[in-house]
Amino acid sequence: MVIVQEADFDAAALAAGLRERAGPTVGGIVTFVGYVRDYAPDTPTETLFLEHYPGMCERELEDIAATARARWNLAGTVIAHRVGALPRNAQIVFVAAASAHRGDAFRGCEYIIDALKTRAPFWKRETLAGGRSFWVEQRQSDLDRAGSWADAPASKESTP
Amino acid sequence: MSGATINLLYFARVAELTGKRSEPWPLQGESTGAQLLAELGERYPQLQPSARLKLAINQTHAKPGAAIRPGDEVAVFEPVTGG
């Protein structure tokens, strides 16, 4: 399930819905919630504005989820991402991966958020408490993390 | 208006720098992402085309060498920062 919306999301309800859909073989669900935080070390963040590319966003997120499901034994996934103006401490993103076994759920969830950060067409514009506003720069550490999945072993491939 | 065009979309800082969200762009036959970025740099020097600018062709990430054909939807943006 992929959701891109301005409205806030209920993380517990999304996880419960995933558990319902994924069925009785699910042994665990790993979830990740991202929040608006202070990005600059010295000045508090007032708001983030999330711009996105409608259409491509949903396609990329569906593709990322499909890649995760092909690579690990996942019974289902949820990706929810907010757009528009988000105040400090607001929820931005939710990822959940359900599996019979925790290893696949942990890796699937982590892969999805790592891939999302470097592939999904969202852009953050940050406004600081003092009023200064700027587009957030992509971080090299995010690129490195996403790149590290390219040669990591996958459970489906390594399991006899 | 005569000749083939593509539909260009600009996002985030690129939309700010060009002052537009989209525009039709003339295309002589088949082009490439790199050629389009060079043309955009001439029209909008403020973009200073570099490795920073990314392209998506028909809503799929594309490398500079990718072919661009008449009627394509081509988006130009800086590296994404979601999540």
Image (cartoon, rainbow, N blue to C red):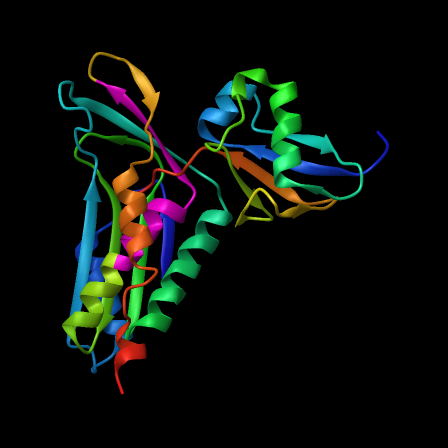
Tally of marks: 0
State left or right for residue A114 relative to residue A64: left
Residue at image position (29%, 47%) is A144
Q: Is residue A125 magenta?
A: yes
Q: Position of residue A122 (x, y in %)?
A: 39, 40
* In this view, B46 is above or below A84: above
State left or right for residue A155 relative to residue B73: left
Q: Position of residue A5 (x, y in %)?
A: 37, 45
- Which residues are the magenta region? A111-128
Screen quadrant of the N terminus of chain B: top right
Residue at image position (48%, 41%) is A53
Between A87 and A69, the one lying in front of the other is: A69
Q: Position of residue A95 (x, y in %)?
A: 26, 56
**Residue A62 falls in which quadrant of the image?**
bottom left
Q: Position of residue B9 (x, y in %)?
A: 58, 34
* In this view, B56 is above or below A50: below
View extreme (bottom): residue: A160
Between A148 and A29, the one lying in front of the other is: A148
State left or right for residue B26 relative to residue A81: right
View extreme (right): residue: B2
Screen quadrant of the C terminus of chain B: top left
Q: Is residue A56 magenta?
A: no
* In this view, A154 is above or below A43: below
Between B43 and A55, the one lying in front of the other is: B43
